[in-house]
Amino acid sequence: MRLGTVMLTSAILLVESAKMPVLAANGLIPPPQEMRKLSGQLDPAQLKRILLGPGTGPGDEQSIREMLDAGREFPALSLSEVRRDGGTRVSGGEIWLGDPRGAPEILEMLVRNGAALPEDRGPEAYCLLVLPDRVIIAGATPAARYYGWRTLAQWLELGHRECTAIRDWPAFALRGVTDDISRGQVSTPENFKAIILRLAQLKMNTYMPYLEDMFTFRSYPQIGQGRGAWTPELAQELQDYAERYHVQIIPIFQTLGHYENLLLQPQFIHLAEFPGAASLNVSCEATYEFLETVLSEIVPVFRSPYFHIGADESWDVGKGATRERAQKLGVGKVHVEHYKRVNEIVRRYGKTTMMYADIVLQHPEILEELPRDIVLFDWHYDPQLRYPSVEVLRRAGFRFVVSPGIQNWAMIFPNLSSAMANILHLSLRGLQAGAFGSLTSNWGDYGGANLRELNWFGYAWAAECAWNPQAASPSDFAQRFTRLAFGAEIPEIPACFALLGQGAELTHYPDLWRHPFYQIRSSQEEQRLLRKRFVLPLIAASVESLLDVSSNRVRRNRDQLDYLRHSARTFRWIGERADLSLTVERLRRGIQDSSDAAMLTNLANRCDLLAEQLNALRQEYTALWLRTNLEANLALVLELFDRQETYLRAAAEGLRRGQVPPRAELSSNFVTAEGRGKNKNNIYARKVFHLDRPVQRALLQAIGNDHLRVFLNGELIGEVYARPSLSIRVEKERVQAWDVTGRLRPGSNTLAFEAISYDPEEPASGNLYLWVKLQDGSTAVVRTDQTWRASRKGEEGWVMPEFNDRGWKPARIANVRWRICEPDFERNLPSRIEWWE
């Protein structure tokens, strides 16, 4: 994209935001199902009393409290009295709250004004009648009446005074969000309550924390340790709070896949499908003893009639311990037998099982045997017009929920355009197919770096699409959300959302963490860097300028602007670093003169400046994280800031010595053996090397695909069995480095490894990098390459120095898709496998 085009696009966005029409007729989020304008105007000052009618009770206390406190937001409204005599008629100056079926005069008034209670629309249906001197909020349940009050509160805040009749009900029985707290950010108790409150005010009734394994167990105290795991006491406290707002908490606790954090620990590895697997071994009774124990502790803690067992993305099943069983019965059969066993455990506690449907849809034969009482979650996160799977589940006769996503995972700012399309269309298709819920997901892949306070735009849109998707209006939603969230019509803020959404199309956190000096391998990669170079700083400047001129008009939630500013500043930094990467590549290619000392000094200064700016971003990011979250897991993200700063400082030092930063790619190769093993995908490789000078320090790095056992001079040094994962903790474990200074000897030495791949389509391979610093200050490196010898057969003594490997063939270079940077052991940095590369 050329700079002129970018500037024109941004200018159009700003002009269009300034020309946005005034709020739609009501401006409510979500919009009601039916609304009629009546004659006359409400005078809020006349409303002095709350009259509680038939059916009201303790469940209405939150509505009453909010009404009594409403004068803080609406000075014209001053309710000071609550009459609890079960009134069946309403007079001037009152807000009547109750079930109209026990109040004939109220019922008649509602019918006469076109606001009859839609009883056939479920227990959360309500009606709201606004007359010149009185208001009726009617519903059969406390939740329905609370939603009626929330509509009135929004109505008044928007400045509406016209008399109105509203009949309203939700399209879906279950409405809410699933909130990933397993991989990074874990809210403080106060922030969890703030999330629940905001969901309730948007008429959502379900909060689903994605725990994965993040719960404290008496039987296994090491689970979730140091990660901010929920305790039973916290669960009880939050449920007490949520019930006041008619919100149920349904935990998502994994019972099959996504157990990588747990199964990497030595005390649990015996439960894995294979070493490094993310899935449990479902052919092992110890697995079910474990599940019986943990489920007996966690299921009774939660009061909802539902319990979600996860069970998504269990791709490892059938590749290790269950391979023979899966070959005999089929992978689908192995899965469904596991689902049945877990379902029986959950049923003992009087709960209905929920689970993700992706594996079921991949193996549709599962549907024939799966118990019909299980509720399936049909999740899709890409924007599409059609989602055929909803019809598959409908025809199979299952109750199911649709689950779109807010496109926030690993994002500096959510991809709003993709999220809005996905949420709306999946909700519509689900409603047409008979889904009874729409629960929108957020995820915290790779350490949960994406700040969760940026989720609220997506949550509000999800609330609109879950309540009334046919009336959901994307064209004016950003303006309506701004009015609701910030308390005023501020056209600059929707423009900020649009601009930051453009930035989300170009970059994300994995891009922020990547090494800046990889080779630019294609014209497409070069074009992406050029777009970042020109577009991201322009977006950042526009957003900060818009916020500067509009922040004084924000009436509430001013702190949310800090997250928008931080996103913009991060975009700017990535754009400026892209310029640095392009400049270094030009020097390498000889397009610019790499012998120009002044130019290299200037480039070194730019590296230092970027490092300083990154440090400022790090401090700002830390403050934003800690504003709403526990400190747990933050250090893992800050390590990535620090690593990036080290890259830049090292480059600056080299440039001042006249050295252009070298290409960052790992120089050692993944190697494998010729052919393919008959039953196991195992390979064995070795290399004899010589040291003729004393060793000062030596570090040995290993990366495996999948499982690697590493030997030096016949001694087992260690193993690598962590595999690609969405967990930042597991990703760190994929690269192992050991100090082997005392294990090297003068003269001949032998490095060896055994590699095992559990994926039949992926050849086993290994990558070793031995860095040796000699006493004279020089360094030597031994790398895996084609000079190594490799075999499919591990013969006796093959790891020993004296083994004769003449019968082995030269190792073959394996094609591994990952991008990995060279280690810098002088600065104590091992290699890092990049994400999304």
Image (cartoon, rainbow, N blue to C red):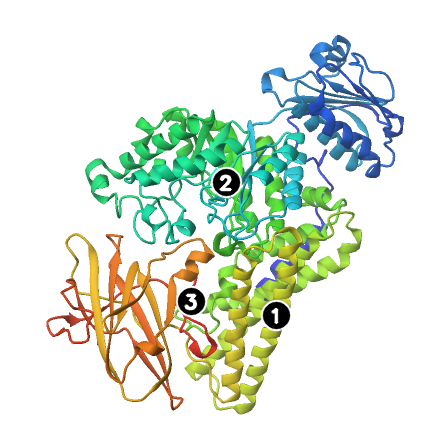
User: Left or right: where does residue 446 sit relative to residue 249?
Assistant: left
Which label belongs to residue 35? none
What is the three-letter code of the residue carrying label 2?
Answer: Pro
Q: Is residue 698 visible?
A: yes
Instruction: Choose top left, top right, bottom left or bottom right for residue 764.
Output: bottom left
Residue 388 showing in the rendered view:
no
Disc 3 crowd rating (10 Å Cα; few below 14, some 14-19, many 20+) is: many
Quarter the C terminus occupies: bottom left
| Foreground: disc 3 or disc 2 | 3
Answer left or right for 295 relative to 498.
left
- Determine the residue positioned at 67% across, 30% down: 244
Please say if 245 is above or below 216. Answer: above
Per the image, the residue denoted by label 3 is 832
- Secondary structure at badge 2 equals loop
The residue wearing badge 1 is 615
Is 812 or 461 nearer to us in this picture?
A: 812
Is the residue 293 above or below the residue 92 in the image?
Answer: below
User: Relative to 423, is 82 on the left or the right?
Assistant: right
Q: Earlier in the sequence, mark 3 or mark 1?
A: 1
What residue is disc 2 on?
A: 404
User: Element under label 3?
Assistant: loop
Q: CA distance from mark 1 to mark 2?
A: 35 Å
Q: Is residue 531 above or below residue 271?
A: below
> Residue drawn 66% across and 64% down?
541
Query: 487 or 193: which is nearer to us?
Result: 193
